[in-house]
Every structure is written in structure tokens, then in C-alpha cells.
Amino acid sequence: MECKKKENTSSCSCTYDPCPRKGICCECIAYHRKNGEIPGCFFSEKGEKTYDRSFENFIKDKKNENIYGNL
Ligand code: SF4
């Protein structure tokens, strides 16, 4: 199976551009899972920009999203 890095990168909502894993979703997930985190694309636009990929921030982000909508 061929890596769809180019295709994935164009639809990736993570704004941390210097990341070497951008568009390589399997590496992105493995990296964040190893660190007890969640990839940036799971967060709202506002939550993603905090660069805090912790579970705590993810839960906070989803609660805010439910209260205030997808800001
Ligand atoms: S979520 Fe993390 S690993 Fe994935 S592209 Fe963004 S900074 Fe890189």
C-alpha cells in the first residue's frame, strides 16, 4: 500500500508545519499515542492551535465545542 502523504497533507488540519510526520498519519498517531496524546486533527480549530495534544485538553476542547459550537 502506497503512502498518501501528499493527499493527507492537503487535508490535514494540524497547523504545526515544521512537523516531519505531517501527512504520514500512521507515524502521527504512533507518535502521539506513545506520548499519551491525541493528534491535532481531532481537535477543533481553536483547540488545535494551543498545540496542547493532551487528553485533558482534548476533553476540554470537546466540552467547549459542545457548549459554544465549532469555534
Ligand atoms: S498532530 Fe502532531 S505528529 Fe501530527 S502532524 Fe501535527 S504536530 Fe505532527
Image: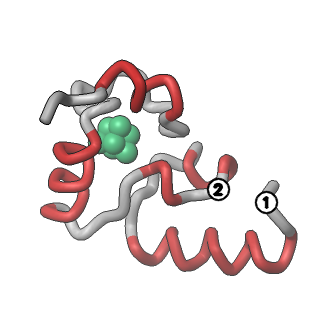
Q: Nearer the viewer, residue 25 or 3?
A: 3
Measuring 51% from the left and 69% from the top, which residue is drawn there?
57
Q: Secondary structure at mark 2?
A: loop
Q: Residues within 10 Å of mark 1 (few under 14, many from 20)?
A: some
Mark closer to the chain start, 1 or 2: 2
Amino acid type of disc 1? Asn
Where does label 1 land, which residue? Answer: 70
Name which quarter of the figure residue 19 lies in: top left
Q: Quadrant of the N terminus?
A: top left
Q: Is residue 37 left or right of residue 7?
A: left
Where does label 2 land, which residue? Answer: 44
Amino acid type of disc 2? Ser
Residues at marks 1 and 2, CA–CA distance in whole angstroms: 6 Å
Q: Position of residue 17 (x, y in %)?
A: 42, 23
Q: How is the image coloured?
A: secondary structure
Specify whether tag 2 is near ligand 1 (CB below 8 Å).
no
Query: Does residue 25 lie above or below 22 as drawn?
Result: below
Q: Residues within 10 Å of mark 2 (few under 14, many from 20)?
A: some
Q: Is residue 28 left or right of residue 54?
A: left
Contact, mark 1 vs mark 2 (Cβ under 8 Å): yes
Q: Is residue 6 left or right of residue 68?
A: left
Measuring 77% from the left and 78% from the top, which residue is drawn there?
66
